[in-house]
Amino acid sequence: MTKKKIFITDFIQDDLQPERKILDDLADVIACNAFHENELTDTIAQADAIMLYHNLSLTRFTISKLQNCKLIVRCGVGFDNVDYRFAREKGIPVANVPDYGTEEIADSAIGMILALTRGIHFLNSKLREPSTNTASEWTYKPIAPLYRLRGRTLGIIGLGRIGSATALRAKALGLRVVFYDPYLADGFDKSYGVIRVESLTELLNQSDIVSVHCPRSPETHHLLNAQTIALLPRGAYLINTARGDIVDTKAIPEAIANGQLSGAAIDVLSQEPPADNDSFIQAWRDVKHPCYHRVIVNPHSAFYSEEGLQDMRIKGANACRNALLGHRLRNIVNA
Ligand SMILES: NC(=O)c1ccc[n+]([C@@H]2O[C@H](COP(=O)([O-])OP(=O)(O)OC[C@H]3O[C@@H](n4cnc5c(N)ncnc54)[C@H](O)[C@@H]3O)[C@@H](O)[C@H]2O)c1
């Protein structure tokens, strides 16, 4: 039997041990290490399955060439970098790997909540100022007033995999957890012991902390903006580990400066890395702006752990194996 061919388009460029361990008896695994689909040679037309990461987009240009492809697997959660609709027209299933970083992202969201609401980030940042080695400055007082976390309300937007993992962790901290998710069937509030609300306004009106866990879509574009941030109780905290477009970060510097937000933690931006003239980034880098001490920015790293990276590869390779063997496929996003 001739061996099948699996192409890894991008991102992975080592000895491919995780993939080969799973696929070796069935297929040759070829890493292309491309940064743009133009760099993929015509041999990809022979692919029996494709593993795609995030360094490039797979469009109609490549998909139309595929002759035997049984599966395109996006080794990650978001699948907006593959033309999954065109793939469906061609009869090629597209799957994602939705769970490689669920716990890490929830842990990061909780870490950000604690770093902000306990004043950990603010005080660490403030104490770096040269003038702080005096008894009057070496104190909690610059962050006062802070309030006990137990009993405060965490509002979760999107109670999917990551939102629910965050909710369960937050409950252990004594937070009252409320969520808004118009697409979730009834009953999950009961499974998780959290409170459902019917509108974003209802959620924001009562959230001392709001954490975003919904997908990017036309509907969620700038869901949090100057107007909706104003619906939060004064002095609230905003956490975004979902997708950049969902929060209009331009609104954050003013909300921090006028005290509407006490802090924000942003793992994801609309443009990554951001432009130097991005007004939010400029305020965060400006030692004279209150964002300097009150805002945390991370480089879209909430998902990261060594185990998660391995999971991405192993789960992607297993999906290809199932496709080659004609087994039932999971996590198909273009059925
Ligand atoms: N920062 C990172 O490193 C990183 C890594 C992976 C995923 N993510 C992001 O995390 C987010 C959540 O991922 P997930 O795996 O939990 O997804 P999921 O599909 O399991 O859950 C998303 C939930 O959001 C809900 N939803 C959809 N539209 C909504 C709306 N308009 N308002 C409120 N809720 C809405 C859905 O019903 C669903 O329950 C996604 O945006 C994903 O891209 C971030």
Image: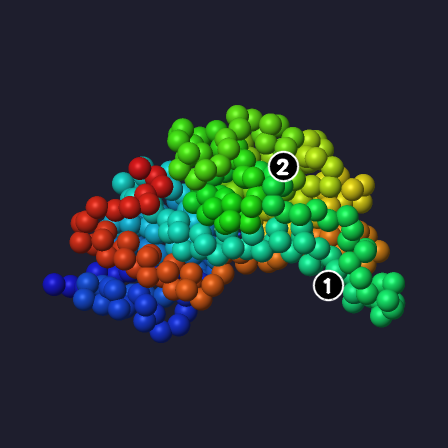
Q: What residue type is labelled 2?
A: Ser
Q: Quadrant of residue 191?
A: top left
Pick the quarter of the image with the C terminus: top left
Question: Compared with residue 207, is residue 122 higher up or lower down, i.e. above or below?
Answer: below
Q: What element carries label 1?
A: helix
Give the residue drawn at x 22%, y 67%: 24
Question: Compared with residue 129, is residue 214 higher up or lower down, i.e. above or below?
Answer: above
Number of other residues with Cα within 10 Å of mark 1, as a class: few under 14, some 14 to 19, many 20 or more: few
Picture coordinates of residue 298, whole percent (x, y): 61, 57
Pick the quarter of the image with the N terminus: bottom left
Q: What element carries label 2?
A: loop
**Depth check: 64 or 159 in front?**
159
41 horizontally vs 25: left or right = right
**Depth check: 20 or 113 in front?**
113
Q: Name the residue under label 1.
A: 124
Q: Quadrant of residue 31?
A: bottom left
Give the residue drawn at x 81%, y 56%: 141
Tag on residue 207?
Answer: 2
10 horizontally vs 325: left or right = right
254 horizontally vs 237: left or right = right
Q: Which residue lies furthest to the top in this view?
A: 198
**Depth check: 87 or 95 in front?**
95
Picture coordinates of residue 33, whole percent (x, y): 42, 65
Picture coordinates of residue 332, whole percent (x, y): 32, 43
Q: Which amino acid does label 1 sit on?
A: Asn
Number of other residues with Cα within 10 Å of mark 2, as a class: few under 14, some 14 to 19, many 20 or more: many
